[in-house]
Amino acid sequence: MHTHIAFLDESGDHSMQHIDLQFPVFALGSVIFEREYYYNLVNPTMDGIKYKYWKHRNIIFHSVDIRKQRGMFNILRDREIRTHFLDDITGFVSGLDYKIIAAGINKSDHFRTYAAPANPYVLTLEFVMERLYFYFKGSGNKALLIAESREDADNERLYNVFKRLMEFGNKNISSAEFKSCITDLEFIPKINNENGNQLTDLIIYPIARKIISRAKGYQSYIEIKPKFYTRSNGDFWGYGLKAFPSQTYQRIKQEED
């Protein structure tokens, strides 16, 4: 039985055959909630924001739709409504109790570094699952991983990586160790309107943006930084957030220091 929920979401395209030079990144991350806290506080509070602005909960928060003010988010073209809505979302995301574990790959750097670059899905999911193990190690707690359902082929690809790690482990973590802290990976269709998936989408996009951006003061990223899983000294690099490959990491660290 799981005590926590770790919502998984991605930003960017995982393909190494096609690299969008405007957004050459793939990021995968998990947002970890204690189960009852999510059901009793997070979910109804996010519904409350939907009711406040749309008078119903039948709306799906998607970062790109919010940024481009399209579809049902066209109400954000009104400056006053947009200001209040973004303040509410920022306060909500900043005020919640959760942890982030994420990994991002600058695909342009990755392609230049390796003759046969590893699949971004494999690299990022391995890192996230390894860090989940260390996050829960010795606590007796376990997480159920929940991802938004995509195309069947994408779901199968992600689940196959997950299943291999759970059954065989990797060079750092054994199968038994993974199973001690993770119960399963489930896919929930977008139509189900799962707030945890939508919240994770809002959180992962700024991380992906940071992997490729030279902007030191990217505000959305700054607001979620305190939520990363950290070492005892407060450093989250390589712990709650990993950037691939090494030159990507070094560039970002240099910008932040």
Image (cartoon, helix red, strand yellow):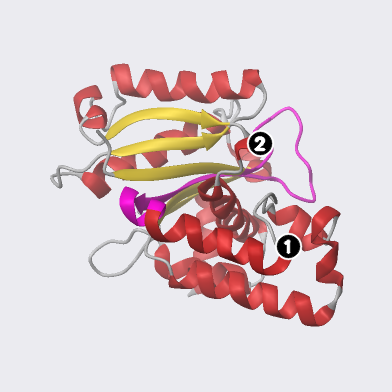
Residue 229, placed above or below residue 76: above
| Span of residues in magenta | 11-39
Q: Position of residue 64 (x, y in %)?
A: 75, 54
Q: Which label was assigned to residue 15?
A: none
Residue in the foreground of this view, choosing between 230 and 50:
50
Residue linked to disc 2: 191
Q: Residues within 10 Å of mark 2 (few under 14, many from 20)?
A: few
Residue in the foreground of this view, choosing between 227 and 95:
95
Kind of residue indicated by mark 2: Ile
Kind of residue indicated by mark 1: Trp
Q: Position of residue 167 (x, y in %)?
A: 30, 17
| Residue 127 visible from this viewpoint | yes
Q: Which label was assigned to residue 54?
A: 1
Q: Quadrant of residue 191?
A: top right
Q: CA distance from mark 2 to mark 1?
A: 17 Å
Residue shown at 23% from the left, 46% from the top:
136
